[in-house]
């Protein structure tokens, strides 16, 4: 007698005991379980079990017992025979690459799902599993604090990965959702360190602009910043020129600004969660260590690398101390911390908003452009533009029940 393979599908109202009752029957016939999967949506159960019946056993008694039990349980049951050739072909597909696509928005809409699944199909990818990472939304509570995240596990090789990423960005713009596309590998499931830019990432301001305003040179500093953004001067030169304009500012002003820093939405929840699960964290900033240390104390950050301002007689001198922390230095420090902590670069997450963050974003296993300028988003592999910092946890595979509130 040939091997007989059966796909069993069960549908009905979810309640305790259904799986145990049906698998108890299968256990009496010593069948081999080839695959199993279950989903529950609004108390509606969908359970699938694929099993192989031993050659010496007839299938009829097994199917009969399952049918009677399903009647007792008040669930619908369906049997589908699977040929060995079909099974072997299906198994052969399992060797294809797997990816995780994460959809994040304030609320999930049919348009978002329609556009996303359409491009997944066109790229020749197959959706294996769809998982909701966030809690079920309340009908009357969609506001600025709402979050919705759905994770798609897909299999196959994209027809054109570059074009695929571009299409995902277009869907993001059209539907107001953030979409991340990552290879599903051991590193994605085992991140160990997260590095952050500070200004306009951990905090919703540029500290040098705040200092400049308090010293009466806001417009001059802004003009230099714009020159740097246009590529007329490099970061180091713009940094030196802007710091020089801060000469004479009272140190007490720095303390006042530090205590009123606007922390980015979700930052505190993010750090509570990272700390709970033992992640190492770092601030790698082209800003100033004075403010980085303040955030280190407030958020519980492990490492801070930023620029030191020279202070004499309680006033800024208009000079800095030590080497300037630019984009290349940020990437270098990320590597050093990872080496010190014995963490593979693929296990590192880096988050930033500016062009000087790109070296570290592209070095890390998961680099995220956060509320970044178009040029930065275009050159980073992942971006978040609609919600706060804590949604980074969804890109790392966390679910709401695992996140510290």
Image (tube, rainbow, N blue to C red):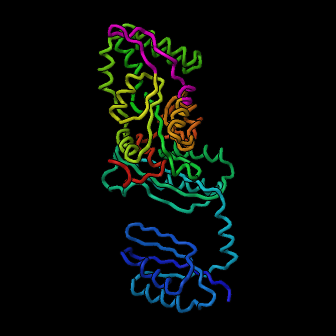
- Estimate the x, y position of residue 167 in percent, counting from the top left: 60, 46
Quadrant holding the N terminus:
bottom right
Viewer-side residue, 68 vs 143: 68
- Residue 376 makes an appearance in the image: no
Image check: 112 left or right of 142?
A: right
Viewer-side residue, 44 vs 116: 44
Using the rendered view, name the quadrant where residue 300 is placed: top left
Question: What residue do we see at 41% from left, 51% from top?
Answer: 148
The correct choice, above or below, for 75 with respect to 221 in the image is: below
The stretch drawn in magenta includes residue 321 = yes
The correct choice, above or below, for 385 with respect to 184 in the image is: above
Viewer-side residue, 208 vs 322: 322
Residue stretch in magenta: 307-332
- Estimate the x, y position of residue 260 in percent, counting from the top left: 30, 26
- Estimate the x, y position of residue 115 in percent, counting from the top left: 55, 53
Q: Count numbered badges in the picture.
A: 0
The correct choice, above or below, for 16 with respect to 72 in the image is: above
Viewer-side residue, 349 vs 231: 349
Image check: 138 left or right of 279?
A: left
- Estimate the x, y position of residue 205 in percent, counting from the top left: 40, 26
Question: What residue do we see at 43% from left, 77% from top?
Answer: 19
Question: What residue do we see at 33% from left, 7% from top?
Answer: 313
Using the rendered view, name the quadrant where residue 118 is placed: bottom right
Question: What residue do we see at 57% from left, 17% from top?
Answer: 234
- Residue 12 makes an appearance in the image: yes
The correct choice, above or below, for 46 with respect to 74 in the image is: above
């Amino acid at each position: 007698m040939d091997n007989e393979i059966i796909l069993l599908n069960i549908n009905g109202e979810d309640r305790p005991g259904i799986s145990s009752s049906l698998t108890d029957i299968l256990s009496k016939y010593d069948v081999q379980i080839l695959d199993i999967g279950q989903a529950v949506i609004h108390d509606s159960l969908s359970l699938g079990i694929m099993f192989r019946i031993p050659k010496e056993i007839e299938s009829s008694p097994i199917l009969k017992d399952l049918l009677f039990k399903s009647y007792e349980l008040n669930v619908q049951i369906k049997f589908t025979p699977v040929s060995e050739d079909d099974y072997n072909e299906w198994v052969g597909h399992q060797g294809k690459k797997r990816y995780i696509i994460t959809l994040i928005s304030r609320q999930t809409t049919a348009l978002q799902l329609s556009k996303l699944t359409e491009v997944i199909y066109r790229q020749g990818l197959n959706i294996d599993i769809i998982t909701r990472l966030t809690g079920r939304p309340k009908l009357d509570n969609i506001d600025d604090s709402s979050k919705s995240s759905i994770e798609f596990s897909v299999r196959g090789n994209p027809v054109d990965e570059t074009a695929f990423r571009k299409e995902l960005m277009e869907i993001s713009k059209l539907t107001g959702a953030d979409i991340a596309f990552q290879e599903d590998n051991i590193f994605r499931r085992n991140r160990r360190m997260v590095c952050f830019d500070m200004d306009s990432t951990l905090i919703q301001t540029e500290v040098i602009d705040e200092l400049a305003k308090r010293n009466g040179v806001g417009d001059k500093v802004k003009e230099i910043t714009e020159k740097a953004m246009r590529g007329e001067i490099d970061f180091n030169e713009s940094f030196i020129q802007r710091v020089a304009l801060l000469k004479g500012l009272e140190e007490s002003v720095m303390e006042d600004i530090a205590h009123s820093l606007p922390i980015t939405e979700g930052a505190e929840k993010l750090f509570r969660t990272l700390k709970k699960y033992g992640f190492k964290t770092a601030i790698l900033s082209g800003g100033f260590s004075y403010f980085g240390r303040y955030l280190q104390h407030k958020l519980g950050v492990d490492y801070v690398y930023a620029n030191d301002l020279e202070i004499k007689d309680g006033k800024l001198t208009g000079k800095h101390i030590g080497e300037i922390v630019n984009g290349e230095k940020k990437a270098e420090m990320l590597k050093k911390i990872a080496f010190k902590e014995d963490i593979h670069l693929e296990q590192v997450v880096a988050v930033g908003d500016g062009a000087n963050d790109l070296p570290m974003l592209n070095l890390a296993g998961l680099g995220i452009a956060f509320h970044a300028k178009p040029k930065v988003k275009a050159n980073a592999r992942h971006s978040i533009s609609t919600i706060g910092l804590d949604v980074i946890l969804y890109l790392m595979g966390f679910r709401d029940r695992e996140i510290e509130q």
